Image: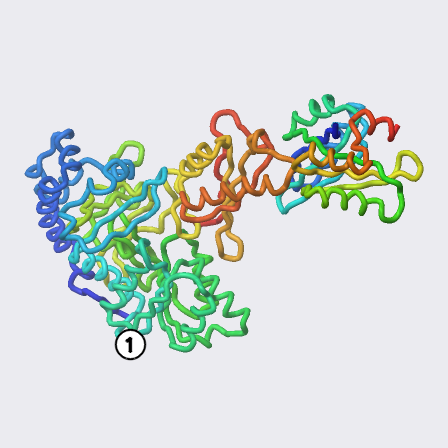
Amino acid sequence: MAITQLSAFLENTPGTLYKAVSAISDAGVNMRALSVADTRDFGILRIIVSDIEKTKAVLSDDTLVTETKVIAVRMDDKAGALRNVLKVLQDGNINIEYVYAFTGGKTGSAYVVLRVNEVEDAEKVLEANGIKSLNDADFDDILA
Amino acid sequence: MKNYYQKEIETASREEIIAIQNEKIVKQVKYVYDNVPYYRDLMDKKGVRPEDIRSIDDIRKLPFLTKDDLREAYPYGLMGTDLKNCVRIHSTSGTTGKRVVAFYTQKDVDMWEECCARAIVAAGGTDEDVCQVCYGYGLFTGGAGLHGGSHKVGCLTLPMSSGNTDRQIQFMMDLNATILCCTPSYAAFIGETLAERGYKPEDNKLKAGIFGAEPWTEEMRRNIEKSLGIKAYDIYGLTEISGPGVAFECEEQKGMHINEDHFYVEVINPETGEPLPDGEKGELVFTSLDKEGFPLLRYRTKDICVLSRKKCSCGRTLVRMTKPMGRSDDMMIIRGVNVFPSQIEAVLLKEGYSPNYQIVVDRVNNTDTFDVYVEFAPEQFSDKIADVQAHEKKLDGAMRSMLGIGPKIHLVAPKTIARSEGKAVRIVDKRKLHD
């Protein structure tokens, strides 16, 4: 299933993140998760939002936006939880490109978003080990 | 200091110079007509016969050559003699990837080296000097020209080539170099590096520097002279005509004397092609009067200059040209390399980018910076940094191989480079190159 992440190109200059976030906010879209990867010249904003189409529409006026399927997993908010998830992926020989994690939503929960090359393979090994890969609707519910 | 390498020519009367030019041009036009079919066609089209050229004043009847002709005739079409009579090739960057390739016979090389020798002697060089040549050696004419000139003068020649500043400084100090030949920006860089390492200007044995191949200002000259404790001389040339030494500066530092016994100079209105009188600003046009391998007639340099035949206190009577004050085309000289925006455009289109780009050139700490802003093509964007950087790297490699110099590539979002009505601002040159 996986969930949909939007990635937007940001120039590495003052105000570009503000501009992007303002556009999303003006469209009344709520962001579930956000991370920015940066280099010398540019950044890539990665977000999970309540309304993908609306977000794409407002961002693509100014910059490049691309959709990516990523894996999202709920964990118990306790020591060792992320390690278990990563162990399963390692044993399944799944390579992780990048990752971000956060706590919140229902009490005692933590979430990790994983960008992997083989989304279906990753989901299979997770499911086989009793770890549910969330879909867009799950993600909305959990955080609502 | 009244030093000449070839006094009889360098201080000849105007009548003597004209007599030499009259004699040479008649022979040279016949030579070119007989041996260069490309130029013969141009003359035929214009209805000019070799016998129409009876004196140097008749040169105006001849057709011009431009860089487009050089590209069209690439590589052999403008040669004046068989390959077996040639001993050397030099090359410079040109538009759309085709380079200018020039051929030299031994006689051409000797003449060119004599011109460089005149420049070195005018800068005070003698056979007692140690001449450090840190222009690039190779296809570029800078290294070979000054190297040959240094030999002719009898200097002890240090063939350093460019780069490796540590080694340059070590040789300069340990072997007591007295004359430095390089680009002005590299001279400034060496001066700064010496100061950083605690050397004072009087710690080195340098007395003169011969600097060219890129634009520089009077202010830069004074800074170099101060930091190295030398007198700095300008030198001008282009591969199409021979290389450095087409014109050189004397101790007056008021314009460069053109070696007009070998290179006839005209200044023309770049719009109409009409010759302009001395003192008026226009495009420099050179005719090589005695070259064999690559004998160009009326070659338009695109450099904008002013000529002066006023008496020079150095005693030389050779006509003087100002430093180039600009270009009549959009060529930029960046770190001594000729760069045309059309080359950058060609790479972008080939690599699948929008041709909406911007070039920003500046000079920071005496070194040219060269940045190219390129709009991302949507299909090239990815959520992964590594993918984006791979695009940057590929474009960087393509630019490097086209230009011979690597710009810093900046990928930006689409539609972020200003599209102005009419002519877009493709080039932002922040360098102060002309006084």
Name the residue beneath numbered marker 1: B128
Q: Tell me the residue at 35%/65% (across/down).
A: B133
Q: Residue furthest right?
A: A107
**Residue B216 versus residue A78: which sits nearer the camera?**
A78
Neighbours of disc 1 within 10 Å: few (<14), some (14-19), many (20+): few
Q: Chain ID for label 1?
A: B
Residue B267, placed above or below residue B105: above
Looking at the picture, how far across and down is residue B297, in whole percent? 19, 42
In this rendering, position of residue B407 left or right of residue A119 = left
Q: What residue type is labelled 1?
A: Glu
Q: Is residue B252 visible?
A: yes
Looking at the picture, how far across and down is residue B245, in whole percent? 27, 57
Residue A119, placed above or below residue B84: above
Q: Which residue lies furthest to the left in this view?
A: B51
Q: Tell me the residue at 84%/36% (across/down).
A: A74
Q: In which quarter of the image is the N terminus of chain B?
A: bottom left
